[in-house]
Image: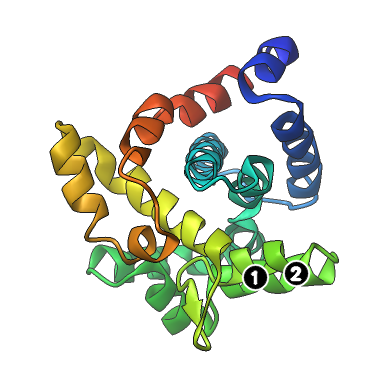
Amino acid sequence: MGSVNEAVIRLGLGPVRTLVVSSALMSAFDVDDEVDMDAFWQHTFEIATLSKALAHALRMDGNEAFTAGMLHNLGELLIMTTAYDKLDRINLHMEAGKPKQEAQQLILGITSAELGGELAQTWNFPQGLSDAIRYQFSPVHDEQFSPLAGILRLANKIDVAWGEFVTTDSKLDWLEQQLEYNILGLPKTVVANIDDVIGSGREMAKMLK
């Protein structure tokens, strides 16, 4: 890893502690050498950073949201470790237009979110964190809504789509079409929160490589 001091300054002690714990947990997985772990960590950091920004806009616990972002893809790691030979078939379904969770369900009979939720529960993670991981694809479940799962879902959508928009108005228009944005009750000023951090998670991951 690179400069720990810089990481502390940019992230704060709470997220850095989460980073250390996450790294230790994920090192327990024996991932195939062909898996692009640089891309994995860049995505992980970006979702964690965006989740923290969304939580702050809602006056929720930013450190809890950062932790959820760092651990949200535990199930992906499990698939990479135990079902690597099936990744190509999953990717083919995704390339054909199926959502990731549907492609995983077709090939594996379970989604990475469900796997991650089960693993988190086995490791005695707090219930809210386990639920956030489990329901990250579908924050509305059993007539309930998991705010932390909603943050993860919206952070992932932002990561994919944000670069398509140039103006504040176009970004806000897009946000207002997202179910999670409306249920969470995010303020319009969240656009500035997102703009402030977008891309910084990936840069941090590169720095700490």
Determine the image quadrant of residue 180: bottom left
Mark 1 in CB contact with mark 2 (< 8 angstroms): yes
Instruction: Please tell me which residue is depicted at 39% across the width and 77% down the height of the picture.
Output: 102
Q: Is residue 21 left or right of residue 34?
A: right
Label 2 crowd (10 A; few <14 / some 14-19 / many >=20): few
Q: Is residue 115 left or right of residue 38?
A: right
Which residue ends up furthest to the right in the rendered image? Answer: 124
Q: Which residue is mark 1?
A: 131
Which residue ends up furthest to the bottom in the rendered image? Answer: 142
Instruction: Please tell me which residue is depicted at 62% across the width and 41% down the height of the picture.
Output: 62
Three-letter code, disc 1: Asp
Q: Is residue 5 left or right of residue 93?
A: right
Query: Residue 38: x, y in percent?
Result: 53, 34
Question: Of the numbered discs in the image, which one, if any, rests on residue 127?
Answer: 2
Q: Nearer the viewer, residue 10 or 206?
A: 10
Secondary element under disc 2, as helix, strand or loop, is: helix
Three-letter code, disc 2: Gln
Query: Residue 151: x, y in percent?
Result: 49, 55
Query: Residue 54: x, y in percent?
Result: 47, 44
Residue 209 appears in the picture as rendered: no
